[in-house]
Amino acid sequence: MPRLLRFAVLAAVSLFCALPLHAQAERDYFNAGMRAFEAGDFGAAAAQFDSLVARSAAWSDLEYGAAAYWLGAALRETGQDSAGVAAWRAGVMAMLEQGSFDVRLADSYLDHLMAAPGRLDEALPTAVDLYVNLLYNVDALLDEEESARLRRHVAQLALVAPAGVMQDAGRGDALGAGATWSARSGAGPLLVTWWRSQDPVPATRSNERLEEHLRRVAHVQREFSDVDRPAGVDDRGEIYLRYGPPEEEIKVRFDDPVLTDIVYRPGVAVSLSDFPDNEFWVFGHIDRSAWFLFVEDKGSYRIAETEDLVPNQLRTGFGPSQRGRIKAGMTIAVLQNIFRQLAPLHPDFAIRYAEVDNYAMRMPEFQPGRLANRTSGSLAAIPGGVTGETQAEQPTAFIQTMMVKSRTEDDESISRREEYAPRVYTEALSDAGELRMGYRTVRYLEPDGSTRTVIHWSPEPGELRPGRGERRILDEMAYEDSGRYLLTLTAVQKTAEYLDRVVHTDRFLVDDLPNQDEAIPVQQTTLLGDTTLFNVAMQWDQYAMGASRTRKGPRIRVATAQLDSLPPLNADPGVLEMSDLLPMTALLASSPADFVPTPYPFGTLTRELQLALSFEVYHLAFGADDQTRYTVSFDVARNDSRGGFLSLRGRDQGTSSSFQSTGTSRKANEMILIDLQSWEGSGELDITVTVTDDVSGQAITRDITFELR
């Protein structure tokens, strides 16, 4: 089958549209090697491929792909694993260098890098390149083997990517039985673009989230493999890909002496092998609802409920007969054993354990000394119930009620997990504390038609003071806290495909910390030159600075933010355009004339502040008198904390130019004042500003949201 591959690092480079002319000897080497390989003569095949690859490590055939792949495969078939991997590596490097790609070769070498602990980290940049290019080619023209290799990567990606991304990229279910997913045209670039958008640390050249994903893939393919599943891993592997390692894990054991005394008795068909292998994972650092029980089923682990830990023969048959009462006692012992081990790990099981344990301790078979005096004869003489209990509280009734209750509570726990636990969790930023940062971005139209984006930023008041976690970082590095800190912002302008376009770095040295309720002066960073859809990634870092040192010390806090799919402002002079709204504040002044505005990057407002919104208007039309005429109106609405919705349509708040205005320029600068003292209570404040060109009839709207406290 013809093969058309693309190289992701380049701009849609076509790899195999036309094959370079090679010497006939090179073609003969390859054909002879393939004949020998298909005949099972791998030594002869390796000799032919080696002669070819020695002359051209990146040599590739339209139908069969890279010669280096077949050389490595032939060598491994002869037991020369190290030589085979070396051939794959040389071929990969040669093809990456010349901007070409082969799915078999890349996937085989990537699998090798993931096959042993530590190996992936030693070649992580290469692994990332290979993985990105594999995804980039999911919609290329491939043979069935190559497509199957890529479907595994797509299935693993489907576990962490939003459903909407996967639907845009393909048809069918990537994780369903039968591998029904098929790529739409453009799926490869779309998936690669999504991964680029997930980079949590724009200040580095690495995509830490993607690297974390590859480390998780390597771990689950080694530890939780299931080749019959689309993602190549069992349910444990799927959860690990989403959440990483659990905070706590245990295996529920069934070899406790008390349990064996009650359950493993002559004449009763229950043995230790009837209890499934299992693992219980708790992700308390993510959400208290995030726990998972896995049981082994036909060689693979699946997500289960606590009832699945009970052997089938102990789940039913609790009739009024002596045998039924014996089985009830056995199952009570099993549940007691299960809940006793799970209760310390999660509160969902603590009440269940207390209930079962309290009942069990009143039953004869659980009494002290029972283990020492165990005889098969005395077990058959267990009384019909617990002394003094009603019929409803007999062991047979109790265990049936408890089994139903356990199923119900498991279902409720699963529902809470699905509602409250995040779908995916990353630890890519876990090495430093979180820096709460206020920021606002405003787009302006430049005279040349490009868009200028200004970022106004400042940490939240009091945020720079080190807390317990930050002091721990300083103590571990034996670094004295001098009260001086360096703030850096790395802002990256990215294309619509999330490729870095321009990287900006700004710094601000804090020599004296402001009061707890004060912020540092608002900083400003300007990004220029955007004319098409763009993205902006931002990272702020707080570093400690020694009292007498000029070099930055350890990083103690970090904040990141990303603005996705920002359209540039419209440069068409015939279309009314408007900048974003820049909030500005000052303490209440006695009159509007005394208002000295300062950019305000934070999301919360108090009534002690006087709020202004500044903006620019572009492409106003001239009337017959060579004047522009336009109207500015705004709407303020608040959804208060009691759920009520209040609205005030504003008119002139003290700036005479806020509404009907005239001018002699097609561009106008405006500022409107909004009185916060008239609002009672707290809640979300939505402000919408509309500019209407009274000459052309065009109108444009911008809005902004605050939390009023």
Image (cartoon, rainbow, N blue to C red):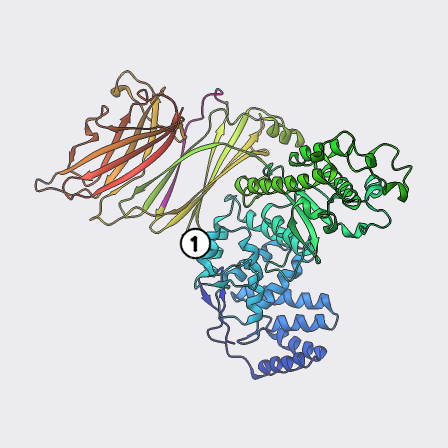
Quick check: 636 left or right of 125?
Answer: left
Q: Is residue 405 left or right of residue 578?
A: right
Is 362 or 630 nearer to us in this picture?
362
Type of residue at label 1? Glu
Quadrant in which the C terminus appears = top left
Q: Which one is in front, 546 or 136?
A: 136
The answer to if 698 sits in the magenta stretch is no
In the picture of the structure, the residue carrying the numbered disc 1 is 497
**Does dot 1 land on a helix, a strand or a loop?**
loop
Residue depicted at 30% across the width and 46% down the height: 569
Q: Position of residue 72 (x, y in %)?
A: 66, 70
Q: Pinpoint residue 470: horizontal percent, then vertical percent.
A: 60, 29
Q: Residue shown at 19%/29% (left/top)?
A: 657
Q: Quadrant of residue 297?
A: bottom right
Q: Is residue 526 magenta?
A: yes
Residue 487: image location, x then y, percent? 50, 33
- Residue positioned most to the left: 624
Q: Position of residue 461 (x, y in %)?
A: 47, 25
Dot 1, crowdedness within 10 Å: few (<14), some or many (≥20)?
some
Residue positioned 76% across, 29% down in the render: 388
Closer to the camera, 22 or 411? 411
Task: Please state if 664 lies on the left or on the right of 170 as rendered.
Answer: left
Camera sees residue 122: no
Question: Residue 508, relative to residue 573: is it above or below?
Answer: above
Q: Dominant secondary structure of the magenta stretch?
A: loop
- The answer to whether residue 459 is seen in the rendering is yes
In magenta, the rendered stretch is 514-528
